[in-house]
Image: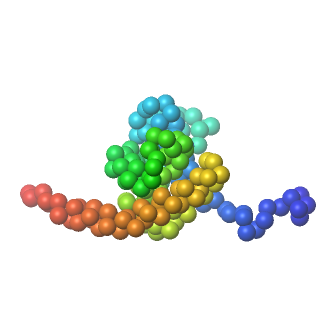
Amino acid sequence: MTVADQPDKKSYKKLGARHKARRRAVDLLFEAEARDVDPAELLSDRVSLSVSDEQVAPVNPYTRVLVEGVADDLDRVDGTIESYLQDWALSRLPAVDRAILRVAVWELFHANDVPPVVAVDEAVELAKELSTDDSPSFINGVLGQVVQVAPQVRAAAAATRSAAPVDEQ
């Protein structure tokens, strides 16, 4: 490999386990929508397949968290995305963009260990890898608006959890 063939150090980014987990979650959500199957069922099938077939990569635990989380909260996630689409319907977006936005919005609302800037940056990176040339800036714009309400959504979820009645014994 010559110096000219080496990747530019600025553009080279080592992909971490969480990035790979997000990408696989996007792949699974995309496939589930394309096949019109429940994402959680598809995930379960892939986990089983990875156990029985060593040629199938195991499913990262964070991929499971993302796919199950999006599947459980799909209506709310989609409603949030749709409320920030200006002159667009969610169904008109490329399917891969829908999957990327779903993962990112779920992380913004529920993944307390993921800083909002990381969730947005990861979504933009996935769009660069998987979607059209216009998708990264579009996704960044939508998520830039969602980020503003994410702290209130997280706080409301935390308040709801803490206000839930404790089972008395």
Q: Position of residue 46 (x, y in %)?
A: 50, 37
Tell me: residue 2, above or below residue 52. Answer: below
Q: Is residue 34 left or right of residue 55?
A: left
Q: Residue furthest front?
A: 87
Compared across the picture, whether 18 is left or right of 70 comes to right
Evaluate whether residue 72 shows in this view.
no
Is 82 situated above or below 39? below
Of 2 and 155, which appears nearest the observer?
Answer: 155
Residue occupying the point 58% across, 43% down: 57
- Residue projecting furthest to the right: 2
Position of the N terminus by quadrant? bottom right
- The residue shown at (67%, 62%) is 14
In this view, the residue in front, 31 or 91, is: 91
Instruction: Point out the image quarter for the C terminus.
Output: bottom left
Q: Position of residue 55 (x, y in %)?
A: 62, 37
- Number of on-image labels: 0
Q: What percent of the width, then of the height, locates residue 165?
A: 13, 59
Q: Which residue is pictured at 59% across the width and 56% down the height?
A: 136
